[in-house]
Image: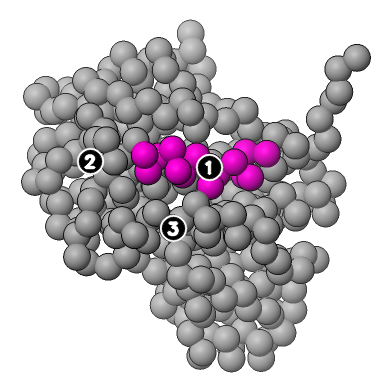
Amino acid sequence: MSVVPSPGWHTRTEIASQPDLWTVALERAATGVPGLPVPGESVLVLGCGTSFYVGTAYARIREDAGHGTTDALIASELPRLLRPYDRVVAISRSGTSSELLDAVRAARRQQPGIRVTALLGEQGTPLADLADDVVDLSFADEQSVVQTRFPTVQLVLLRAALGPSGHGDDTDPAVLAGLPERGRSALAGTLPATGIRQLVVLGHGWGVAIAEEAALKVREAAGQWTESYAVGEYRHGPVATCGPGTLVWGLDAVPTDIVATVEAAGGRIEHGCGEPLLELVRLHRYAVELATEAGRDPDVPSLLSRSVVLPEAAS
């Protein structure tokens, strides 16, 4: 007789697998990843949802590392006229998202000579057919609808592939080499108490995109009221919603003035360690705990599917 997995089993298992897969990503980056942008190329990164947030983080890291102009756009919001680019990087776990496929085709129509690199979980998909180069990330693909390990493995690979830049820890080989072990600690460490009414995630730099991704995970898995902001922007209006039951979670240490304001309003603070991916792992775990508390199954999120294929594209 087959055993039916408990609610959230797939999601929890995939969350727990991240450090081991980060090691695989680091090994692959060390041997070179054909098709990734080279220094000096002007790059457009396209994605939807989680893939857009990954692309936004990568764009900031690549530019900060001095590798060249890197923009990230939501695939469904492509402007009428693109700036000139040497390469499009299209990110998709499924390779079937209608809006991403349409955006790649539109970029090609505008700039016929542009090269397209696809970062894919599923191979042999429509996006692979459109691409000049495919980065095979099937080793990090997931059964769960809510993405966890696929985006974090991508970011580890992309950061490592950039090489040392001398501009901080984002691409430092020693820092990256330590991520898997630190990830295991993030999986084993304590989490803030649940029972909240509102979660606010704060980041800075490329961590702003990771804060947005973390908030998305909590919404998807738990249906929880969750917001995300650049740290400084929280002062400029959003703090007005803070009150008893609010948890403000910084990917870094939260500034003292924000701590004082939140605590005076009856909210709580969770200070992060400063490495966005490690805090994202903790927030993955927290999302599952919130889902369980709400009686939801993280493996079966409400109203969501693995890929958004629009009716006209499916016909």
Badge 2 marks a residue whose secondary structure is strand
Q: Which stretch did the figure color magenta?
A: 13-27
Residue position marked by numbered label 2 in the rendering: 44
Specify whether residue 26 is painted magenta. Answer: yes
Give how far apart the Cα atoms at labels 3 and 2 are. 29 Å
**Residue drawn 75% across and 37% down?**
9
Viewer-nearest of discs 3 and 2: 3
Residue contact at pointers 1 and 2, CB within 8 angstroms: no
Q: Mark 1 is on which residue type?
A: Asp
Q: Report whether 220 appears left or right of 119.
A: right
Mark 3 lies on a secondary structure that is loop
Q: Secondary structure at mark 1?
A: helix
Residue type at mark 2 is: Leu
What residue is pinned by disc 3?
178
Give the left or right position of residue 131, taking residue 303 as reference.
Answer: left
Rendering coords of residue 148 (x, y %): 56, 43
Residue 315 falls within the magenta-colored stretch: no
Instruction: Give the vertical position of 62 relative to 143 (above or below).
Output: below
Asked if residue 33 can be seen in this view, the reply is: yes
Q: Quadrant of residue 92?
A: top left
- In the image, residue 175 lies at what x, y percent? 37, 61
Residue lying at 24% horizontally and 23% vertically, measured from the top left: 133
Image quadrant containing the N terminus:
top right
Q: Earlier in the sequence, mark 3 or mark 2?
A: 2
Residue at 46% from the left image edge and 61% from the top image edge: 276
Residue 99 in view, yes or no: no
Q: CA distance from mark 1 to mark 2?
A: 30 Å
User: Is 7 left or right of 35, judged from the image as shown?
Assistant: right
Q: Which residue is mark 1?
A: 20
How busy is the neighbourhood of tag 1: few (under 14 within 10 Å), some, or many (20 plus)?
some
